[in-house]
């Protein structure tokens, strides 16, 4: 029996504001981070992913006070990304209640940081976000093209010690047109670490298709924010389609 598939709501924040965009653009406020976290916590989600999309671009470190506030009421594992530049940042985030950190600073820039985090805290603590556009790995909120093929990037970060890959199709992000199944399949088949499918989820069936394509977890933002959908209902749907989940 394999590991249960995880269903992960993704919260994109800028400061303390919950935001949502399309294809990593046109960010708009859709609420507050604290309120959204409390709602997810009340639903007993498998895991929660919180990404501060403005931290790196604005030269900010992670907001530790916000992380402490959000993790105080949520007892599910939480991954936090945005503004992470050093092992000390990771140590501070873990001390503030995060269970994992999400890194996305560039295929070359990130090498030493991923290795150092993995060596210091273990591979389970580091998730590398691979944002893909036109088949290439993009960084800095999809404004910088590393010119590295997504599959090669995935293999590289696995060797560096990444415990998981958060794989996002930039073109599908926020569109609710379904995950990029070809991308998920290609990356999942090329690595031995879990791949979290992200970008474009519009339904529970999209999640089912992503799992069939090789994803170990499915992340969704717009589906849970704008539709009458919940992680628990998603879990029941997957269970009914013979996918092992936590119920």
Image: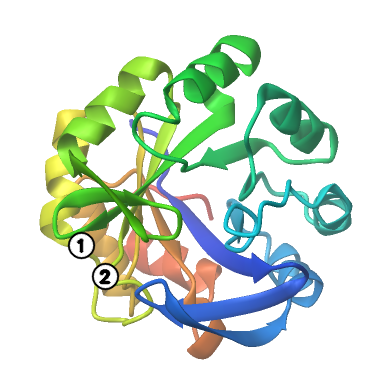
Residue at position x 23%, y 26% from top? 155
The answer to whether residue 10 is left or right of residue 159 is right
Residue 210 quadrant = bottom left
In the image, residue 111 above or below residue 59: above
Q: Which mark is residue 121?
A: none
- Label 1: few (<14), some (14–19) or many (≥20) C-alpha neighbours in 10 Å: some
> What SS does tag 2 mark?
helix
Residue 30 quadrant = bottom right
Q: Position of residue 127 (x, y in %)?
A: 49, 36
Residue at position x 31%, y 73% from top? 200
Color encoding of the figure: rainbow
Q: Which mark is residue 209?
A: 1
Residue at position x 17%, y 37% from top? 151
Question: Would you name the residue on which mark 2 appears?
Answer: 206
| Residue 57 in view | yes
Q: Are marks 1 and 2 in contact (CB under 8 Å)?
A: yes
Q: Position of residue 212 (x, y in %)?
A: 18, 52
| Residue 223 in view | no
């Amino acid at each position: 029996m394999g590991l249960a598939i995880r269903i992960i709501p993704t919260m994109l924040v800028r400061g303390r504001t919950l935001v949502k965009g399309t294809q990593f653009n046109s960010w708009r406020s859709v609420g507050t981070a604290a309120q959204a976290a409390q709602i997810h916590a009340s639903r007993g989600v498998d895991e929660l992913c919180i990404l501060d999309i403005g931290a790196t671009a604005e030269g900010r470190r992670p907001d530790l006070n916000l992380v402490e506030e959000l993790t105080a009421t949520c007892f599910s594992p939480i991954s936090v990304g945005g503004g992470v530049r050093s092992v000390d940042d990771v140590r501070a985030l873990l001390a503030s209640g995060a269970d994992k950190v999400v890194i996305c600073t560039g295929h070359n820039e990130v090498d030493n940081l991923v290795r150092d985090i993995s060596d210091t805290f273990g591979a389970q603590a580091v998730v590398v976000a691979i944002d893909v556009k036109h088949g290439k790995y993009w960084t800095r909120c999809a404004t910088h093209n590393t010119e590295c093929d997504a599959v090669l990037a995935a293999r590289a970060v696995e060797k560096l010690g990444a415990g998981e890959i958060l794989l996002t199709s930039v073109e599908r992000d926020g569109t609710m047109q379904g995950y990029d199944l070809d991308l998920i399949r290609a990356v999942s088949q090329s690595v031995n670490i879990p791949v979290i499918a992200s970008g474009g989820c519009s339904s529970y069936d999209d999640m089912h298709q992503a799992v069939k394509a090789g994803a170990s977890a499915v992340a969704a933002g717009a589906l849970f924010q704008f539709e009458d959908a919940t992680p628990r209902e998603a879990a029941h749907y997957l269970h009914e389609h013979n996918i092992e989940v936590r119920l």
